Image (cartoon, rainbow, N blue to C red):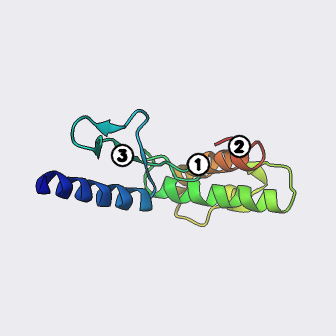
């Protein structure tokens, strides 16, 4: 009895810790039969403004700046157009990094436009 109570408390604490960092239960996760513990299956929630994991460091930087550019355009009631963003057209980076930055910026800007202007996640 003490062991199963201890397991339940440990699982409950782990669940609270996971939820506090933004993890969400996987669809269909429930109570594991016979133990009164949540079934394994927590995943980290992916927010709309998080850069895709496949991007390299320069592209992630561009993605973040693209999100910020879309936020600025939305906040200033401008028509969304990535080509109107100075930081997209003329990034202050070494020449070798500019294309990767622009690709990331474009993806981030589009994600921002989709979310802010069109309510998509």
| Residue 11, percent from left and from top | 26, 54
Quarter where residue 75 is shown: bottom right
Instruction: Give the CA separation, mark 2 to mark 3.
Output: 27 Å
Residue 111 x %, y %:
64, 46
Q: Residue at x 70, y 43 (%)?
A: 114
The extreme front residue here reads: 1
The image's mark for residue 114 is: 2
Q: CA distance from mark 1 to mark 3?
A: 19 Å
Question: Picture quarter containing residue 39?
Answer: top left
Crowding at mark 2 (Cα within 10 Å: few <14, some 14-19, many 20+): some
| Residue toward you, 21 or 110 | 21
Residue at disc 2, secondary structure? helix
Residue at 31%, 56% (x, y): give it.
Answer: 12
- On screen, residue 109 versus residue 52, left or right, reads right
Badge 1 vs badge 2, beta-carbon distance below 8 Å: yes
Which is more N-terminal, label 3 or label 2? 3
CB within 8 Å, label 1 to label 3: no
Sequence-first disc among 1 and 3: 3
Residue occupying image coordinates x 61% and y 52%? 105
Q: Secondary structure at mark 3?
A: strand
Q: Say which residue label 1 marks.
A: 48
Residue furthest to the bottom in view is 92
**Mark 1 vs 2, N-terminal side:** 1
| Residue depth check, mark 1 versus mark 3: number of the one nearer the observer | 3
Dot 3: few (<14), some (14–19), or many (≥20) neighbours within 10 Å?
some
Which residue is more in the foreground, 18 or 99? 18
The dot on residue 25 is none
Query: Which label lies toward us, 2 or 3?
Result: 3
Q: Which mark is residue 42?
A: 3
Q: Residue at x 67, y 45 (%)?
A: 110
Classify 121 as above or below 96. above
Quarter placement of the C terminus? top right
């Amino acid at each position: 009895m003490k062991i199963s109570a201890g397991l339940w408390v440990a699982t409950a604490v782990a669940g609270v810790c996971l939820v506090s960092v933004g993890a969400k239960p996987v669809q269909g996760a429930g109570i594991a039969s016979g133990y009164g513990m949540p079934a394994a299956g927590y995943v980290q929630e992916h927010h709309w403004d998080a850069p895709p994991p496949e991007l390299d460091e320069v592209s992630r930087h561009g993605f973040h700046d693209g999100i910020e550019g879309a936020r600025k355009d939305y906040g200033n009631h401008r028509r969304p157009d990535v080509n109107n963003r100075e930081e997209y057209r003329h990034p202050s980076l070494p020449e070798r990094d500019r294309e990767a930055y622009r690709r990331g910026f474009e993806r981030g800007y589009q994600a921002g436009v989709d979310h802010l202007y069109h309510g998509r996640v």
